[in-house]
Structure formats: C-alpha cells, structure tokens
Amino acid sequence: MPRLMQMTGPVIDLVYRVRALPASGEEAVVTGFEMTVGGGFNALAAARAAGIEATMGGTLGTGPFGYTAAAALGDRDIACARPPIPDHDQGCCTVMLEPDGERSFIAWPGAEGRITAEALATIDLAPVDWVMVSGYTLHYPDARDALASWIEELPRDRRFLFDPSPMIAELPPALVDTLRNRADWISANNVEARVMTGHTDAEVAVRALAWGRQGALVRLGAEGCLMATKGTLHRLPAHEVTPVDTNGAGDCHIGSFVAELSLSGDPLRAARYANIAAALSVTRPGPATPPDRDEVLALL
C-alpha cells in the first residue's frame, strides 16, 4: 500500500473559541477551549482516512506534549520514522477560533523545530512513496539546513510535495528555490501562491507553480481549488458546507490529495476527492477531523 511520510512534526493546539479577536490591549471573550494534536499530524491523519499508510518523519519530543502527540499517532496507526529526542517537549500553538470558523495562530516550536543530519540519516525510505514538508519546519533555524539538504538528495523515485505554509514569506529565497526545484507537486493557498510567484491572478500563479514539475494546486477555500498539470488548468468547485472550524483544512486537502492520487493515479480525481474531504473536515471541531473514505466516495 502507498505510504506518505511527513517531515513536519506535530504540535499541540490550544484552541480557544472566541466571540471575536481581541484588539491590542484587550481580552477576548472565550466560549470554549480544547487541547488537541495538530501541525504535521493533520495531513497524516487525512492520508490514513483516505486509505494509505503514513509515517511521521518529523521530530517527536519527550514530555507531556510529546507523549500526547505520540498517543495520537498510535491511535491512527501512523508509524514513526525515528525515536523521540530527549530533553525537549513538543511545541504548542495557540489557535483563536472565531464563530465563522476562521482561525488565527500564535506558535512557538519545541522538539519539532529540531532536526539534525544525523537523525535524518537513520530514516529508512524503503517503504516510503511520498515525502512532504511544510514551510513551518523550514522556518526553524535548528531544522532548516539539515532538512533542506536531505530533501535535495531524495531519490527521484520518491515523490515530494512542498506545502509552503503561511511562513513562506519568511523563508530565504535560496531555500525556497531548493525546495521548489525538487518538488514534484506544490500545494499552496492563494496567498502563499502569490508570495511564491509574484502573480496576483491565481490561475497565472498555479500555472507558474506547476512549470517544470508534475503539477501544482492552489487552494481557494470555499471556492474550491485550481490545479495545473503539464499545460492544463482545471478549476474545481468546492463541496458546499457550513464551516465550524477551518483549522487544518489545508492539511486535510493535501493528505487526501496525496492518498487519492496514489490509489487512483488520476490527479483530477484526487483534487476532487481532496475538495470534498477538506469541506467535510471543516464541519467538525478540531484540526484533524478528516472524513472516512466511504463518506467521501459517496459524494465523489
């Protein structure tokens, strides 16, 4: 069975449901709270729900947050490519969730922000078909250089997907070029695509992102997504839902796309599958709420 390995580690999301984001110097009115596993975990959970195997290649820590993340991975039958590191716990992300489902983040890394060349050298790529990484990990000074070099040397028969993340504007241009040159697929939201290409028109941006590789997607939220492959452009509408929590929707789209592309070999079908899966995920509270495969297929 195909296998996706995620090189961005999990974090602990501290989710505050707020009536509105507070102005500077003010306090938000909080209507609910939960602590859950997010970050790199989200795409792997989506890939598992969509029917393929998954491995965490990012760093796990040792401590209360690290143990929570490890338990969540175990619950989804997600393997770990290397053991946890000592003396560092997992990082956390404060998520402020507004009534319309929109989310805002404040985060600080823990163990997931540390990756060494020696640790990467221990990873067994034999069972891996896909490797993905988020720009979040490449923003961490203690992970960036080792991970970029490792990705640059990935065997060409392992497909690599680059998720720029909202941190793309903070990454050194030379680093972005390295990741872009190696990527078989790029999946970005509209803002990230604009930063990477300089094009404000999403259709022009997705064509630019797809140039020289198998393809690219630009996720448009409630408007669906654009996909470009070898000169062909597709605009795929979203599955209409009423959002409750948009945290992790992009991750769900990516993990679902990789899984369905691996199983069907059809990028267009995979993008349609990902649109439905991501839409269903935002109708449920939490960052890792992908629908089961049968649920998506019934709508596909």
Image (cartoon, helix red, strand yellow):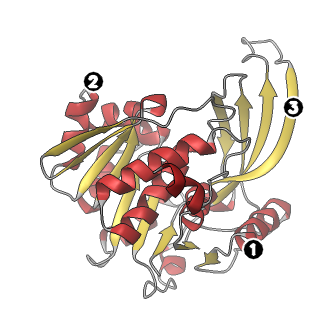
Amino acid type, mark 1: Pro
What is the three-letter code of the residue carrying label 3?
Answer: Gly
| Vertical comparison of 257 with 151: above or below | above
Number of the label disc, if any, that sits on residue 200:
2
Determine contact: label 2, label 3, CB under 8 Å: no
> CA separation, marks 2 and 1?
45 Å
Q: Position of residue 76 (x, y in %)?
A: 69, 70
- Look at 67% across and 80% down and name the residue there: 83
Give the spatial CA distance, label 2 vs label 3.
37 Å
Question: Could you give the CA–CA distance between mark 1 and mark 3, rounded to whole angstroms?
Answer: 33 Å
- Under circle 3, the secondary element is strand
Check disc 3 and report the residue beneath it: 32
Q: Which amino acid is tagged 2?
A: Thr
Category of crowding for the residue at label 1, using alpha-carbon neighbours closer than 10 angstroms: few (below 14), some (14–19), many (at least 20): few
Q: 163 or 23: nearer the eye?
A: 163
Residue 128 left/right relative to 249? left
Q: In which quarter of the image is residue 160?
A: bottom left
Q: Seen from this angle, which residue lies furthest front? A: 298
Residue drawn at (38%, 56%) of the image: 270
